């Protein structure tokens, strides 16, 4: 079981490196991506400075300028996402093929023991294709997803490919703070 756990962590590292390699070939080295990323960085910093200097009693003119700047930033973020889209399809295709292969290898094998009983709606994933009623047994897919989620983020940061904090803050990602456009309304 311990050997399987180490193997899955290694597989997760390898697939994360493969994904970043594919993304680098298809996206990060292109001139369009570099230009859009620089533009988003510049606009994010510019918008942040304007928001810091504005007061509650600011005129409608300044508010309109900020709204236009935010709209421009949203458009550039959308264009950046569209550039990344082709690599996402390639990565999705590769991961689907790899997942089928790994699922057949680890089918029905307990690869780790969880120190807790997962929530009922997660048990289907954590106990997938395992026999028995011990829900602290962990299946391949659950451990692989957890490892990949944590490892890929760190690999992106180590390689310098993670989005900047300023751009993420302004974009208002899934878990990030929402844009503060309503602050001036």
Image (spheres, rainbow, N blue to C red):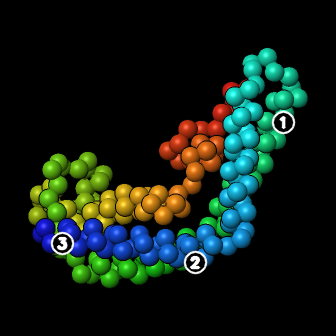
Q: Residue at x 32, y 62 (%)?
A: 147
Q: Residues within 10 Å of mark 2 (few under 14, many from 20)?
A: few
Mark 2 vs mark 1: give the one in front: 2
Q: How far, Cα to Cα, is label 3 from label 1?
A: 57 Å
What residue does disc 2 label? 25
Rendered view: 29 above or below 55: below
Label 1's element?
helix
Residue 177: give x, y in percent of width and height: 55, 38
What residue does disc 1 label? 65
Q: Is residue 78 visible?
A: no
Q: How far, Cα to Cα, is label 2 from label 1?
A: 37 Å
Q: Is residue 97 left or right of residue 112?
A: right
Label 2's element?
helix
Mark 3 vs mark 2: give the one in front: 2
Residue 90: give x, y in percent of width and height: 54, 77
Q: Is residue 37 visible?
A: yes
Q: Residues within 10 Å of mark 3 (few under 14, many from 20)?
A: some
Q: Residue at x 26, y 81 (%)?
A: 104
In front: 183, or 135?
A: 183
Mark found first going from the N terminus, 3 or 2 = 3
In front: 158, or 79?
A: 158
Report the quarter where the N terminus lies. Answer: bottom left
The answer to the question of whether label 2 and label 1 lie on touching residues, with beta carbons closer than 8 A, is no
What residue does disc 3 label? 4
Mark found first going from the N terminus, 3 or 1 = 3
Label 3's element?
helix
Report the quarter where the C terminus lies. Answer: top right
The quarter of the displayed image where residue 88 is located: bottom right
The quarter of the displayed image where residue 83 is located: bottom right
Q: Residue at x 60, y 76 (%)?
A: 26
Residue 42: give x, y in percent of width and height: 72, 49
Q: Residue at x 11, y 57 (%)?
A: 134
């Amino acid at each position: 079981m311990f050997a399987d756990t180490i193997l899955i962590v290694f597989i997760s590292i390898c697939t994360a490196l493969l994904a970043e390699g594919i993304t680098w070939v298809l996206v990060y080295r292109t001139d369009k991506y570099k230009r859009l990323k620089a533009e988003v960085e510049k606009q994010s910093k510019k918008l942040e400075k304007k928001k810091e200097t504005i007061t509650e009693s600011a005129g409608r003119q300044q508010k309109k300028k900020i709204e236009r700047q935010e709209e421009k930033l949203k458009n550039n973020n959308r264009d950046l996402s569209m550039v990344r889209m082709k690599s996402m399809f390639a990565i999705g295709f590769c991961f689907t093929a790899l997942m089928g292969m790994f699922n057949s290898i680890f089918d029905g094998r307990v690869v780790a023991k969880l120190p807790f009983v997962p929530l009922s709606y997660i048990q289907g994933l954590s106990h997938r294709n395992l026999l028995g009623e011990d829900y602290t047994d962990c299946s391949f897919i659950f451990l692989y997803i957890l490892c990949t989620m944590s490892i890929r983020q760190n690999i992106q940061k180590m390689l310098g490919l993670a989005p900047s904090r300023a751009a993420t803050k302004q974009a208002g990602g899934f878990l990030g703070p929402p844009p503060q456009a309503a602050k001036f309304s």
